[in-house]
Image: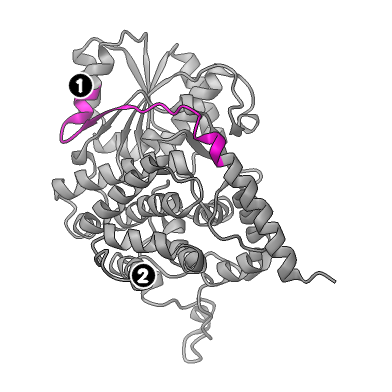
Amino acid sequence: MISESMRNTVRAKGLGALMKGAGLVTRFIPIPQPTLLVGPGSSGRLGQAVAGFGHRKILIVTDSIISKLGLLNSLTDALTAGGAQFVVFDEITADAPIPLIQKGIDFFHEHDCDAIVAFGGGSSMDASKAIAVAVANPKPLNQLAGYLKGLRAPIKIYAVPTTAGTGSEVTVAAVISDPVTHKKLVIVDPRMVPKMAALDPTLMTGLPPHITAATGIDALTHAVEAFVGNWTTAYSDGMALSAVGLIFENLRTAYTDGKNLEAREKMALASTYAGFAFTRANVGYVHAIAHQFGGLYHTPHGLANAIMLPFVLKYSHPAIVDRLALLAVAAKLGTAAEDEATLAQKFLDAVDQLNHDLGIPTTLAALREADIPKLARAACHEAHTGYPVPRYMSQAECEDLIRKALPPKTAPDKAAPASEKTTTKTSTRTRKPKAAAKA
C-alpha cells in the first residue's frame, strides 16, 4: 500500500516537472517595460509627457485620501499646463473590489476617456489595469480573470505609485476582489504593463511607518520568491538581488525617517526591480496564502505577505540553501567566502529581525482555526496551478504552516470586569497598527 508520504513525493515531482515546463514557455513571452521617470518631481514630468501624447481625455484612478491630500497636484498641474483634458475617479478602496471597478468603467465611458493614469498604491494600480482590460473587452470582470482572457489590447495606462511595495507599475497582473465569493481574482495580460511610470519619492514621504513597513516587506517578498522559485532567469535574478540589497540598506531608514528622500527613492527603485523580477519569475506560497487572507479577512496584502514570509522561507529552506546564501550576500549579511549553510541561516534570521524592527506582527489577529483547512486548500490550488515553488507542500503541511500564524490564546483576567473578559489579549507586537497598502 502506498503511503501518504510517498503519494506526496510523487505528486510534488509531477507538479514540479509541469511547472518547470511552463517556465520554459513563459521565457519566450514578450513582456514590455515602461519608460521610467525617477526622482523628486517625476510625477509632474510624467504629466508633461502624457499631455503631449494627444489623448482625448485622461481618466486618473486613485483613492479619496490621495485626492484630499493634494498629491495629485503636480500631475494635474502639468496636464493642465500642457492642455490635456482629464477627470478624476477617486473611489478606489483596499482590495480593488469588483463593484468599484465597474463604477470606474462606467465613469470612463461617461466621460469619453481614452487613457488612464493609475495614481496610488496597489489597489489603484490593479483597479486601473482591470478597467483598461474591461473597457477594451466588455465582459464581466470575473470572466477576465486568468491568462490573456481579453482578445483586444487594454486601454493605455500610465502609472504613479505612491507606495514602495507592489511593483504594479511594471507588472503584467492585476489582483482584484470579489466581495460575493470573498476571493481574490488575478487578471494577467502583458499588454496591461503601463507605458510610462514615475517613481516620485516626494509622494511617499508622508506614508505612516506601518504602511512603509508592510509595503517594504511586500517588495522583499516579491524579490525573494522570484529568486528562490523555479522560473528564474539571469535577468530576474539580477533584479531580485538588486532589490534585496536596496531593501536591507534602506527600509529601516524609510521606516524611522519618512522624510528621507534618498531612502524613499531607493525603496521605490527596489519595489520596481522586484516587480521586474517576479513578473518574469513569478511568486510562491507566501502570495498564495496571503491572497486567501485578503479574500476572507480583507487583510492588507503587504501585511499578509510580511507575516507569512518567514514561515514559508523556513519550510522551503532545505531546498534553497544555495539561493538563500546568495540573498544573504546581496543583503550584506556575510561574504561569499562563508559556507552556504551559515549564510542561509543568516538570511532567515535577518528576515525575522527586519520584521521585528519594523513592528510586523508574528501572527494574524483575524485568523481562525476553523478556516484553516479551506484557506490551505485554496492556497495549495493557487500555488500548484500557477507558481514555480521550490518545495511542494501537502494540504496538511500547508495547514500546519498557516496555523503558525494563529494569534495566541489567553485566558480572560478573572479580576477584570465582565465587560472586559470577552476581549482577547494580544502581545505587544500584535497590537502594532495594521498596514493598509496592498501588492
- Quarter assignment of residue 7: bottom right
Q: Which label's residue is closer to the chain start, 2 or 1?
A: 1
Residue 97 visible in rendering: no
Looking at the image, which residue is at 32% across and 68% down?
350
The alpha-carbon separation of the residues under discs 2 and 1 comes to: 43 Å
Q: Horizontal placement of 240 versus 393: left or right? A: left
The residue wearing badge 2 is 352
Residue 386 coordinates in the image, percent (x, y): 59, 45
Residue 38 lies in magenta, yes or no? yes
Q: Residues within 10 Å of mark 1 (few under 14, many from 20)?
A: some
Residue 369 coordinates in the image, percent (x, y): 63, 70
> What label sits on residue 200 in the rendered view?
none
Q: Circle 1 — which element?
A: helix
Q: Which residues are magenta?
A: 23-46
Residue 20 coordinates in the image, percent (x, y): 58, 46
Residue 413 lies in magenta, yes or no? no
> What label sits on residue 77 in the rendered view?
1
Q: Horizontal placement of 102 versus 273: left or right? A: right
